Every structure is written in structure tokens, then in C-alpha cells.
Image (cartoon, rainbow, N blue to C red):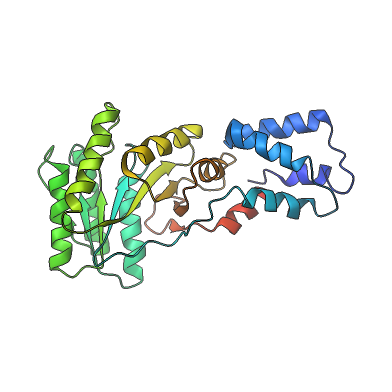
């Protein structure tokens, strides 16, 4: 991204940054999806930088706006139950499959649940991924009860001694209240058998501040514990990750960088900051 590389050169030693420079930086930060709230904070703090290590000082400023919460997956009583939530089109179902593949590589035994029953393509997609990576997928009837599929997934995971039960949930947004109520129901039904250890919200990194709005809505409904950000591939708009962590204190736990099953990795905050200065 290199968002801050040109700016750093202007504030080394005695800052030569003019009012116009600050305005340009502000515009760049907004274009990079840091959002107006975080942009204002960063500009105010950057104006106080003195000395030759401008990059180090600016990096420290940005670090303070990242969540300090653990980026490791929480561990519950076996099976650890993880709900994957998010709106349609952000890569939610693919992310569920990628996370399953990621865990399976470390010899974890797991079960996938296709609880997005309102979208037939999601069930087919997850079933196809499951067959490819060798992970059982629990399904239900099209437009059937998502909570029932989620419950059956955890039940199967218990019976098969799975270490994880990953559940892909519905993502339709045409009636937000219905969607959020459905997610709440899934969580309540599942917790009759096992506690939900993680609720991971999938956000498309290219949707900008709309991703922040989604994070707020889902957090209010199901107590999101972490994020999976897709399409965070070094584009100039990757600042939304920083904005979400700053405003909601939700840690990004994984990122998706492409369509292939291997294009998925734990989020490395320092590597992310490196990208902002590269």
C-alpha cells in the first residue's frame, strides 16, 4: 500500500509539512478507508511528531489504534464451536471452508455446518469444499431451519469427537432484523449443547466504511469476537482494517487474499503496518 511512505519524508527532523501537505494526507487516509474519525486522530497525533525517526513514531501511533485483544482462536470444551457470520457476497462461505482447511492442516478434526439454508448455492459450495479438503459437512433442507442445521452440526461433532464445529450462517440482508434475530436463535440453540467460543464476522476489505457499519450491526446482535477480512491484498483501501479495530476493538484474526483455498492466513498486525509504509 505504501500509504505513509511519502508522508514520512516530509516530517523528518523539523517538519516541512505544510497545511496543504496535511490536507493531502488527510485525503489519502480517507481514500484508504481509515474513515473520518480515525483520520482526524492520526493527523492530530502525527503533527506532534518530532525527531528523525518519523516512521517509527508514526508506526507507534498506528499500533495504538490496533486492538490489543488476542488474535488466537478461543478454545472451548471439545468441540470448540465457531459461528461464521456476515452479509452475502463478502466471502463468508469460502472463508468458512478456508478456516476449516487451515485447521485441518494442523491435524485438527472438525465438522462443517451449512446453515445458510436460504441460499442453495452456499450449501452446494460448502459441500464441494468439504469434499475437496476431506471435512464432513452437515446440511439441511433448502430454506429449512438454520438453527436446526447448526444444532445437528454440533451434535455430529460431539459424536465424532471433532475438535471444532464450524457453522456457516445465513447472510441475507433484505430484512436486517430478521437476519439478526436468526443469528441470535442459532446461537441460543447451539448453546443448549455446547457454548459458542467464537463468532467470526467476515468483512470484504474493499467495501470501505460499509464494513465498519456491518461490524457494528453484527456486534450488537451476536457479540462478535473477531474478524475475517477478505480481499485484503495490498490494495490502497486496506485502511478499513485499522478503522474497525480502532472503533470497535475487535481483533482481525484471519485474512483472505485470493480465491484459492490456500489464500488465507492469520492476521499479522506488524506485517500489516509494514504494508502501510512499504
The percent position of residue 170, horizontal first and vertical second, equals: 25, 40
The percent position of residue 110, horizontal first and vertical second, equals: 24, 65
Q: In which quarter of the view is residue 152 placed?
A: bottom left
Q: In which quarter of the view is residue 260 placed?
A: bottom left
Answer with left or right where residue 184 lies relative to residue 211. Answer: left
User: Who is closer to the viewer here, 44 or 170?
Assistant: 44
Determine the residue positioned at 56% across, 45% down. Answer: 242
Above or below — where is 263 with respect to 105? above
- Residue 127 in view, yes or no: no
Above or below — where is 265 with respect to 236? below
Q: In which quarter of the view is residue 101 placed?
A: bottom left
User: Who is closer to the viewer here, 152 or 6?
Assistant: 152
Answer with left or right where residue 1 lies relative to residue 168. Answer: right
Residue that sits furthest to the bottom in the current view: 107
- Residue 179 in view, yes or no: yes
Q: How many marks?
A: 0
User: Who is closer to the viewer here, 23 or 105?
Assistant: 23
User: Who is closer to the viewer here, 64 or 146?
Assistant: 64
The percent position of residue 222, horizontal first and vertical second, equals: 31, 43
Answer with left or right where residue 169 lies relative to residue 235. Answer: left
Determine the residue positioned at 57% across, 39% down. Answer: 237
Residue that sits furthest to the top in the current view: 174
The percent position of residue 59, horizontal first and vertical second, equals: 69, 52
Determine the residue positioned at 67% across, 30% down. Answer: 27
Amino acid at each position: 500500500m505504501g500509504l505513509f511512505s511519502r508522508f514520512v519524508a516530509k516530517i523528518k527532523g523539523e517538519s516541512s509539512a505544510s497545511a496543504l501537505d496535511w490536507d493531502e494526507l488527510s485525503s489519502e487516509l480517507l481514500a484508504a478507508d481509515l474513515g473520518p474519525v480515525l483520520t482526524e486522530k492520526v493527523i492530530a497525533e502525527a503533527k506532534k511528531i518530532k525527531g528523525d525517526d518519523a516512521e517509527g513514531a508514526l508506526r507507534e501511533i498506528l499500533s495504538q489504534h490496533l486492538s490489543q485483544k488476542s488474535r488466537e482462536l478461543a478454545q472451548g470444551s471439545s468441540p470448540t464451536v465457531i459461528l461464521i457470520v456476515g452479509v452475502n457476497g463478502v466471502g463468508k462461505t469460502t472463508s468458512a471452508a478456508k478456516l476449516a482447511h487451515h485447521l485441518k492442516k494442523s491435524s485438527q478434526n472438525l465438522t462443517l455446518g451449512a446453515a445458510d439454508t436460504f441460499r442453495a448455492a452456499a450449501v452446494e459450495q460448502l459441500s464441494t469444499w468439504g469434499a475437496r479438503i476431506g471435512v464432513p459437512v452437515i446440511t439441511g433442507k433448502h430454506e429449512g431451519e438454520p438453527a436446526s442445521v447448526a444444532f445437528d452440526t454440533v451434535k455430529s461433532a460431539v459424536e465424532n469427537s471433532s475438535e471444532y464445529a464450524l457453522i456457516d450462517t445465513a447472510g441475507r440482508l433484505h430484512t436486517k432484523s430478521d437476519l439478526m434475530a436468526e443469528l441470535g436463535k442459532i446461537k441460543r440453540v447451539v448453546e443448549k449443547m455446547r457454548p459458542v467460543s467464537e463468532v467470526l464476522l467476515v468483512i470484504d476489505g474493499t467495501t470501505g466504511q460499509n464494513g465498519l457499519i456491518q461490524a457494528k450491526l453484527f456486534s450488537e446482535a451476536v457479540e462478535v469476537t473477531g474478524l475475517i477480512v477478505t480481499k485484503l491484498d495490498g490494495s490502497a483501501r486496506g485502511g478499513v482494517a485499522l478503522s474497525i479495530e480502532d472503533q470497535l476493538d475487535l481483533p482481525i484474526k484471519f485474512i483472505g487474499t485470493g480465491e484459492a483455498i490456500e489464500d488465507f492466513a492469520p492476521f499479522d498486525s506488524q506485517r500489516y503496518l509494514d504494508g502501510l509504509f512499504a
